[in-house]
Image (cartoon, rainbow, N blue to C red):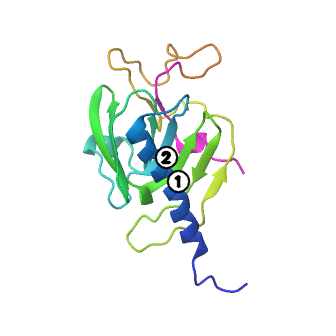
Amino acid sequence: MAEDLIRYDILAQDALRGVVRKVLSEVARTGLPGDHHFFISFATHAPGVRVSSRLLAQYPEDMTIVVQHQYWDLAVTEHAFDIGLSFDGIPERLHIPFTAVKGFLDPSVQFGLQFEIATRPGELPAEAPRVLEEEEPQPVDDDTSARLPAPVAEAEPGEDENHEEDGQPAGDAQVVSLDAFRKKN
């Protein structure tokens, strides 16, 4: 096979990250339409990521945020997005470059993208992104997951009082590990 000097894999990643950028830009401008909501996984150690030291200690490799009911000040630029979220009742402001995004899932329409990321400046991703078509992820009850709390009452991770009978979240956002919506091989 001939060597890919054009680097189609990187061009494809950039184009698909543009989908994420466009969607978030529209949501920042007009809000979430209908039942749409997003699970966005990112590498917490990637260049340009800004999260509190508390969150970095809790999620040293990667974390997944949910953009659904409880977020504020979503701002999108060409290279990154900023968002306000609450973790354990503490408001946080996150700055996430699009190059740090590992996964994007809109479970309302079963659309998802998965990316390989460069962890150091100049490093190339290991493989091209894949478009995922899966069922809606279920919250994972392990050490890498945590419930995004409601503004008034909080539950400990793993408690099920805010879930409908079918096991789906009852309106509260959830943080789940990327493995919860990665395609099983």
In the image, residue 67 sits, relative to residue 24, either above or below, namely above
Give me the residue at 45% from left, 25% from top. Answer: 157
Q: Position of residue 13 (x, y in %)?
A: 54, 63
Q: Is residue 63 visible?
A: no
Q: Nearer the viewer, residue 147 or 37?
A: 37
In the image, residue 153 sits, relative to residue 24, either above or below, namely above
Count neighbours of disc 2 (C-alpha within 10 A) and say few if under 14, some if 14 to 19, many if 20 or more. Answer: some
- Helix, strand or loop at label 1? It is helix
Q: Amino acid at mark 1?
A: Val
Q: Position of residue 90 (x, y in %)?
A: 27, 29
Q: Which residue is mark 1?
A: 19
Q: Main secondary structure of the magenta part?
A: loop
* Residue 139 within the magenta-colored segment of the rendering: no
**How many numbered dots are placed on residues in this image?**
2
Q: Position of residue 141 (x, y in %)?
A: 53, 29
Q: Which segment did they paint magenta?
A: 170-185
- Helix, strand or loop at label 2? It is helix
13 left or right of 95? right
Q: Which residue is mark 2?
A: 23
Give me the residue at 49% from left, 46% from top. Answer: 23
Query: In which quarter of the view is residue 136 placed?
Result: top right
In the image, residue 139 sits, relative to residue 53, either above or below, namely above
Query: In which quarter of the view is residue 163 placed?
Result: top right
For the residues bearing labels 1 and 2, Cβ distance under 8 angstroms? yes
7 left or right of 174? right
Give me the residue at 61% from left, 20% from top. Answer: 167
Q: Position of residue 179 (x, y in %)?
A: 58, 44
Rendered image: mark on residue 141: none
Count neighbours of disc 1 (C-alpha within 10 A) and say few if under 14, some if 14 to 19, many if 20 or more. Answer: some
